[in-house]
Amino acid sequence: MAIRKLRFKGDDILTKKARKIEVIDEKIKELAEDMLDTMYANDGIGLAACQVGMLKQMIVYDVTYIDEKNPKKNPHVLINPVITTKSKSLVTVEEGCLSFPNIFDNVVRHEKVTVEYTNLEGKKVVKKVKGMESVCIQHELDHLDGIVFLDRINKGKYSIKYEK
Ligand code: ZN
């Protein structure tokens, strides 16, 4: 178990595209474990690899842990995730981000998406998600493209891409 150092607003790495993971080796498994440790330690529900300084296409999340009625951990690790379908219906949810402490704002997302990814065992997975899980996956996948949630709201005003 290791908690890694988070990258924050203004860090260039948050604006960069992540690279595809070709081989799931011990280093990748360790990164996944550390990302989950870092996420839980900071009370987050999702984390992308770039937020701990790694430009790799990996995200972790657990949207059940925040629910106090269900405090059981249910961690997910998604390698090379791609969203393949998006619902027309949209939802607006107040989002935050571990790289932007104390900033929360409403973001419009697709209510349902299908995500395809490779799991830690190297198996291909196709998963249909909705609600909070869908919102969380869209937020984290944006990170892999160098996009942060504030970019979705008011590009230019908050965007770290335009702030030095
Ligand atoms: Zn984030």
Image: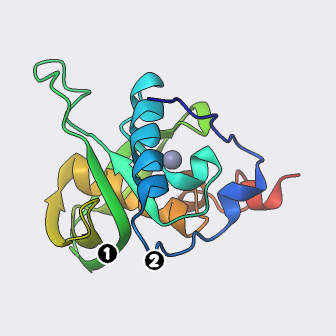
Q: Residue at x 17, y 21 (%)?
A: 71
- Image side of residue 111 versus residue 103, left or right: left
Give whichever of 43, 73 is nearer the camera.
Answer: 73
Local crowd size for mark 2, using a 10 Å CA cut-off: few (<14), some (14–19), many (≥20): few
Q: Closer to the N terminus: mark 1 or mark 2?
A: 2
Q: Residues within 10 Å of mark 1 (few under 14, many from 20)?
A: some
Which residue is at the front of the view, 157 or 112?
112
Q: Nearer the viewer, mark 1 or mark 2?
A: 2
**Type of amino acid at the residue the image marks with label 2:** Glu
Residue 123, position as x, y percentages in the image:
20, 71
Q: Secondary structure at mark 2?
A: loop
- Residue topped by disc 1: 83
Q: Which residue is situated farthest in the right direction here?
A: 164
Q: Which residue is mark 2?
A: 22
Measured as percent of width and height from the top left, residue 132 is found at 24, 47
Mark 1 near mark 2, Cβ–Cβ under 8 Å? Answer: no
Which type of secondary structure does the marked residue at label 1 adopt? strand
In the image, taking residue 130 as reference, residue 37 lies left or right, namely right
The picture places residue 125, in percent across and down from the top left corner, at 18, 71
Identify residue type, mark 1: Ile
Q: Is residue 4 above or below residue 119?
A: above
Residue found 43% across the figure and 72% down from its top: 23
Residue that protrudes farthest toward the front in the picture: 26
Pick the front one: 95 or 63? 63
